[in-house]
Image (cartoon, rainbow, N blue to C red):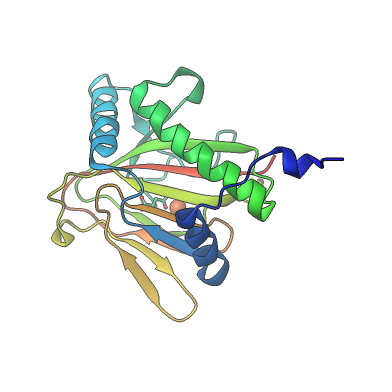
Amino acid sequence: MSSLFEAIPFVENTLYESIISDISTQKYSIIDNFFTTEEVLALRDSLLLKYEEDAFKKSAIGNKDNEVVKKAVRGDIILWIDERSCNAAEELFFAKINDLKDYLNRTCFLGINQKEFHYAIYPKDTYYKRHLDTFQNDDRRKLSFVCYLNNEDWKPENGGELVLYLNSEEKAIYPFPGKVVIFESQVLEHEVKPVNTPRLSITGWLKTR
Ligand SMILES: O=C(O)CCC(=O)C(=O)O
Ligand SMILES: [Fe+2]
């Protein structure tokens, strides 16, 4: 008799295995070219178009039921992405995210069955102070996911490093285009250093119900 697991072919994915290994040993993983140059370009165009349409709003601290806008803590402006009404670029984005999510669920039994993603723009002189990505009234966020959509010529002098506060060191990560950073939402405190050139990204969370 064939078992349920034999019915679903499993192909090991080297990239995903290295992400899983990184997260289990150090609580975070950095993937330099998770998105191709073309994908970044399409997603950046999508972000900029929506910004021109004025769809962004000042981001808030707290979740959707408990929102307070606090400029002293974070200065980015955000736009949530609705997976049910995606454009072509966003569809490709979610195809990659869902593939990774399904792999994580099959290999790590994480039980991820929800996700939420938003575009973010950090205008000049904004930042996001040191924080954890979980809320007092909601601990469903398991993995945080940041994808940078900056121009190819982004320079370290532009600021906006993501700093992860590890046990023994502070890890600074430059927001180069196509790079993805994944980390454990409930464990790793982090911050975004002040930017002196607008900084573009998509941030999201893989969640349990
Ligand atoms: O953009 C980043 O590098 C991190 C953003 C962040 O920490 C957040 O939105 O919670
Ligand atoms: Fe965060």
Quadrant of the frame with the C terminus: top right
Task: Please give the name of the residue rendered at 42% of the width and 26% of the height, measured from the top-left corner.
Answer: 91
Task: Please give the name of the residue rendered at 74% of the width and 43% of the height, measured from the top-left corner.
Answer: 6
Q: Is residue 68 visible?
A: no
Pinpoint residue 152: horizontal percent, then vertical percent.
16, 47
Pinpoint residue 112: horizontal percent, then vertical percent.
64, 43
Task: Please give the name of the residue rendered at 82% of the width and 40% of the height, measured from the top-left corner.
Answer: 2
Q: Is residue 79 above or below residue 164?
A: above
Task: Please give the name of the residue rendered at 67% of the width and 43% of the height, measured from the top-left corner.
Answer: 208
- Which residue is at the front of the view, 36 or 11? 11
Pinpoint residue 169: horizontal percent, then vertical percent.
41, 78
Pinpoint residue 31: horizontal percent, then vertical percent.
37, 56
Q: Is residue 38 left or right of residue 87?
A: left
Q: Is residue 10 left or right of residue 57?
A: right
- Which residue is at the front of the view, 191 or 117? 117
Q: Is residue 157 above or below residue 141?
A: below
